[in-house]
């Protein structure tokens, strides 16, 4: 059975034409036919510095129109082996993180109930927690591959439990991720205090600071996470793991980061991992300049991730 | 029978969410149900100075998400009285004006054959000629209300007959518009020579220079076109009729133009005219700045035009 | 007694030098000496479209450095007749509108308790409600002069009572403003439905749409509000009342608005009104372009407002 | 004898092609053939706030490529009746206002010695003083039409006599302009103190504040300067006289200014005045946004000025 | 005989002064004296995604003004050993690729007939084909060093043979390049299908994907092309070979590319190759941000290329 | 004794709130309590190409608000071990380099007299000379670590001794630095002539071109400067040493430079050096794009430098 959902053909319809969807895939919520859903979560209400990620899904859709269907590095046409479409966005509640969390969890839960793989596009990093709630409900505590400049395991923020700096602490506390199977890659920048990573140490999470990535290379990191993130694994990619030169359009940029080539290598290194969900977060278009290179990189990283997924053989 | 096509409700889905269509209307090509089609024509291959209008439809869709459904000045909810959707774009051929003209004419012809009113979003002004060809095929020579800084009645351009400076000369030559029923409003800027408007004079077209708009006001202009543009009338609105302060994102900006308030007033003045087609052209997003105010104004002008259309009573 | 707080002298310290405060006034929280506080409220968590107003106070401070101390139109040096300083910002809670409201109200209450006049700089329009709560606590229900493109009297938003589209409905409901003494100026744009202004009609609020401002002029509007807004009056100026050409950097821009000259005229028209508080809201710097003209206009409007305040004669 | 210097023909060479000169005129320093020289003065070393006007001539050249040769309002083809070319720039000394003044004066003196009319493009307003020195050397004290937001008659600046806020005070002190024949139009914004215009009053200069322009109109201003600026007159147009909506790219923007249409009207009102020199100053491209509308307006104002010059009949 | 064409001396004329030419060289078409011509080809009519490269030559000229004459890595002053000037642009026909091709071929043919080395600045990559036609007419089929993210050997595009994705397929088909002596470096990104490089394989072209450049280094690539590109060689450098972080201003950006340092190394590796022509294409200034770093890099790459050319000993 | 000066706590006051100071430290000139002063020098009057660095201190302050207090790489909380505050700016004289030099020297002298370590933020590179004058007055001729793309040892500029290309030549000439203990790192780009580095050779200064940094790595460079820059050392970091991809916002960008990660490594390599003063210069915000990544990197480099300073043990 051939796939029902394919990007528009650029030799028939120019890349800049037609309403923007991710890679110009059909916009569909047909849970009976989909096995993979690219779903936007345009929420920036959990942001502590620059806002604007609410426009991340819109701009990533726009910039994704340049991507062609065949991945020559991974030797796959992801839309030939899976039924993937642009699912549209979760209708978040801009002024309430609590109401938004409920909506995200419900929507991801619906996808998982229908055995549809969620590929989420943020939005700020606070959106990962409700995704993980839905994922853990289905899969139990999962492993974690978390690529980011920041650990996002801080404690409360001005009296609030939820913002984009806490999702992974909350996820551990709620038993959504199994810390011994969790790895955080690309950590860098200044800390609030000496004890910023005590949580990780206490819970046995693996931390790979940027210095290790730079000194040992991407392949070494991939080795480490293959050793660490066993079993079903959730993958969360914060675009601020990448250096601001390559990704200026983000909410809390951190200098001294990954290059785009390193970022691509990391995502390609997910091949063969038993991933159960993915998000790409923290793209803030108002800070991205006319070339919108952050959104373009993000779109490519999502595409690379899609290319790592195994084929779905129809029943 | 209630309308089938309505914008997403912003109290249920935030304005920045979901794939962008014009005013977040459904994306539909259902010619059996539509009576009005908003159709993008993302072609900038006829441009003599700044390119970039190929991204006009994409950006106007994005910015239109701010517009609410009820028009309090014209006292109408256009989507309650007509079946209007985002029809998507004509798949233009970026490297060939000839091939593009054929595709535009065919698509508009299809719309008109199904009695669907075409509301086109450019693209550069060269796209108006093939629209007029389709319109005239159905309606015969039409009247013209043309709001612009430039007459677009120049002769050949570097040996070529078609570019964004010639559509109205060609249209007169081809008998698509009836010059005595044609009026051009907002003309200004420097000319190539003393005889730039000889064509108009020779053919009896009415010309309203910007000085007259400023001195006598919008109401007076509306009076003039009511007197001139009798019978079926095509309306073409070039965004560069508006001053660059209000519309910097355009291909051949001309200083000393309309304000946004005057532009709105002109479009509202189309109420009661027997319009048979409309285009809004020359929005070039790369030159529009982070606020994208040109695309926003263009989206509003399209909405105002939609609000001037009479209700369609289903058979 | 000479004033203690004066802007840095630009003939001694260049305009671009020294840490930015409003008009390069001293940064002070000395409630014993101040009679007027310019206070930032950098909250954009109540925003329904473009975020970014959290950076409004920072950018308005920066752009205000161009303003000189003497106002030749109103013939006053405001800092010679009042003790005004940059009070700094309310430390809002970016992820919680409820917690933020509590902090704003408390801070404004502190100012009013010390008989310090609050001049607030937003932030989105949701910040006005807690200011009004503090104001009404001190002054009882107040009159209102509200300059804006939008009424901001909508009902709930996605199940939430508070966002930047509801403060004035809430304020009427809570008895903070006296509707018969309230006037809204500059209203325009599309509505959600025919009944968007039923609330105003029902409560006897005065509404001046943009068409009336354009047709009758600023002086006529000033006449109307002098007749309407008797007694202690709160003034709220939403920068989106001004046309996007003059104020592109805002969250929900609306075409067809005020010119900067009209906006200045309106603020100058507040002379002699018994104002008890003021805010300037909705400046969103990420959408403002390199010239930051929106922040510059906002800074000037705040300065003009300061110039309308009567001298404070020390006891 | 036909003119030797004509813009490239846009029907033979597209507007964006070929190295940029003003209106794509020949670049020439042939003093034997020229009667009018467009000369850039890229100096921003006299600037008190935003720098960047050193790139004014480059960008105005670029944007001028859109202008066509025939002026339909003034009914003239300026390059048919005068020998005008792009003279290139004065090689200013960026780090020394004194050395720069010497070079400007020498270059303008050379032009005047050869009876070539100087049309200068700044640069900041400090460049006007050395031009006036050369002009007065040839013509004696001249009349002045000065269109600006600011009087530029302040005293010393941080111990220095020369910066962009003092040229006209210095010019009066040095006897270069005749104050009774001087008129300043468009004055607005805040002042340093009540006595900012005492100098004007003391010397009998005429001042037209923006309020008068807005209330009485451009024609009335033109009347006033025809009555005031008798005899040989120098004209200085500071782009910040125009509102930041129309001219964001400038060093000391002032809200509440001229529209582009008013600015064009003022320049056209110079027809018949015995002008002996002209400058257009204070365009700062880094603050102008992608549309570069300030440079475009400036280029058009220069062109309009050229169109007001009388034909030169060859001997 | 000393060279006649030298850049302006920055110690006499500041870098931002005078009309922009490449490196502020004289603008000359004196074929009798030149041996090297820097020629702009401002055509973007062959572009499939973002347009804007028509402004490439203008902006590269502007940014080149920062480059100094002596190359310390290659130890040469290129303008001391060759007679090189800014030749100006080919007057392309923006609306016709066919008419443009004829003009480009004719202009390059004229240069080659006069034994002037063509250094072309695009414009989009479609301009390379007519250059190659002229080159092959003189030199026969040439070798090719092609640095790019994309192979540009696709087949027809929407029914058209010519656009910026086909020049090298057409060149092989027309016998302009000898595929066995052709090498393509930097290939990356997604493909249309598995067979995108079948053409190369079938014709024996050498392909160096980005992974090989990153893994083995620039020196290794240079080795490979020295082995491959024997005899007269044409060099085509597409700026999108460089990563969008370094070159955001381009039409079809591709993430994961060269760094600027690698790009410089590659061009320096051309020393000693028998090059017969060069182009630098696909710089699109509207997408380049205020720093215009893409145009700056492009200008430097052109300068580096000029530095690799052997001295011309006058007869 | 605990330190008196600490950044605002981001868990109590959001990062975007309160008037901007460096890292939101107190603004203080209390020479009796400070041991380290971050002092802005907003002067761009010594610039030969793009101006705008006068806004460097303002923007670096703004962007520094993202930095947290603990440095995990150097394992230090700099504000716990030193008394550091934002000292404000030197009130430079924008139009006079001579007057500015006097003010800078006096201010730095005051700091040094009070044994306060000066951490200066430019401004263009011309500001380093008067700092060095004050430093040498106290410490005698010092060693120099100079990280830059350019040597800044050129001779006179258009007849002037001082501009941003000469400070280090002047410093050697004036005996402020000891050339044998001076090292310049990151040199690259084109030269004026073969002899650009003769001065260095003649005086025994050590030069490390970019090629050596790239080939041997940061650690090797650090080795070299530990061997070279003995004794009291002044450190000057020109942001244009970093590649324009990472630092587009600068006055004379030079392609092919350091990555941000390399830059951080170099600054960290200053640990243990006996530094006596530091500057970070040449950040020009108008050229930095909406993400302001250059200012952000600069702020981080200043913070890294602060982290390398030894603790001050109170007497």
Image (cartoon, coloured by chain):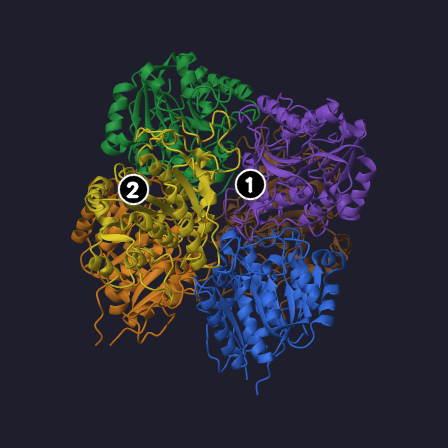
Chain colours: A yellow, B purple, C blue, D brown, E green, F orange
Structural crowding at the residue carrying mark 1, measured as other residues with C-alpha within 10 Å and reported as few (<14), some (14–19) or many (≥20):
many
Residue F152 can be seen, yes or no? no
- Numbered circles on residues, count: 2
What is the chain identity of the residue bearing mark 1? B
- Report whether mark 1 lies on the same chain as mark 2: no
Residue A290 can be seen, yes or no? yes
Residue under the point 72% across and 64% down: C221
Considering only vertical position in the picture, is E261 above or below D53? above
Q: CA distance from mark 1 to mark 2?
A: 33 Å
Badge 1 marks a residue whose secondary structure is loop
Q: Position of residue D57 (x, y in %)?
A: 55, 44
Q: Nearer the viewer, residue E65 or D211?
A: D211
The residue furthest right is B227
Q: In this image, B296 relative to A291: left or right?
A: right
Residue holding disc 1:
B21
Residue under the point 70% across and 24% down: B170
Residue under the point 47% across and 16% down: E109
Q: Nearer the viewer, residue F211 or D31?
A: F211
Q: Nearer the viewer, residue E45 or E26?
A: E45
Considering only vertical position in the picture, is C18 above or below F207? below
Q: Position of residue D122 (x, y in %)?
A: 56, 48
Q: In this image, C297 relative to D140: left or right?
A: left
What is the chain identity of the residue bearing mark 2? A
Residue holding disc 2:
A275
Q: In this image, B14 relative to A120: left or right?
A: right
């Amino acid at each position: 059975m051939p796939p029902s959902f394919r990007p528009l053909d650029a030799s028939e319809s120019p890349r800049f034409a037609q309403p923007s969807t991710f890679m110009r895939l059909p916009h569909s919520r047909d849970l009976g036919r989909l096995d993979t859903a690219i779903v936007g979560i345009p929420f920036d209400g959990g942001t502590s510095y620059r806002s604007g990620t609410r426009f991340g899904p819109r701009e990533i859709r726009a910039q994704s129109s340049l991507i062609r269907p065949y991945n020559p590095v991974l030797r796959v046409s992801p839309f030939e082996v899976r039924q993937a479409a642009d699912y549209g966005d979760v209708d978040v509640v801009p002024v309430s993180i609590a109401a938004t969390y409920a909506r995200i969890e419900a929507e991801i839960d619906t996808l998982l109930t229908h055995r549809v793989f969620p590929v989420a596009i943020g939005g700020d990093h606070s959106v990962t927690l409700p995704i993980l709630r839905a994922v853990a409900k289905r899969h139990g505590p999962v492993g974690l591959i978390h690529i980011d400049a920041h650990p996002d395991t801080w404690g409360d923020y001005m009296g609030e439990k939820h913002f984009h700096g806490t999702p992974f602490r909350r996820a551990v506390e709620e038993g959504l991720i199994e810390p011994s199977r969790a790895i955080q890659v690309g950590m860098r920048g200044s800390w609030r205090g000496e004890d910023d990573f005590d949580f990780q140490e206490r819970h046995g999470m693996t931390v790979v600071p940027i210095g290790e990535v730079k000194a040992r290379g991407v392949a070494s990191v991939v080795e480490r996470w293959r050793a660490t993130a066993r079993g079903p694994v959730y993958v969360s990619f914060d675009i601020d793991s990448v250096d601001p030169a390559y990704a200026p359009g983000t909410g809390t940029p951190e200098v001294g980061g990954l290059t785009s080539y390193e970022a691509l290598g990391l995502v390609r290194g997910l091949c063969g991992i038993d991933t159960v969900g993915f998000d790409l977060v923290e793209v803030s278009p108002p800070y991205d300049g006319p070339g919108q290179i952050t959104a373009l990189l993000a779109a490519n990283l999502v595409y690379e991730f899609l290319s790592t997924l195994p084929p779905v053989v129809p029943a």
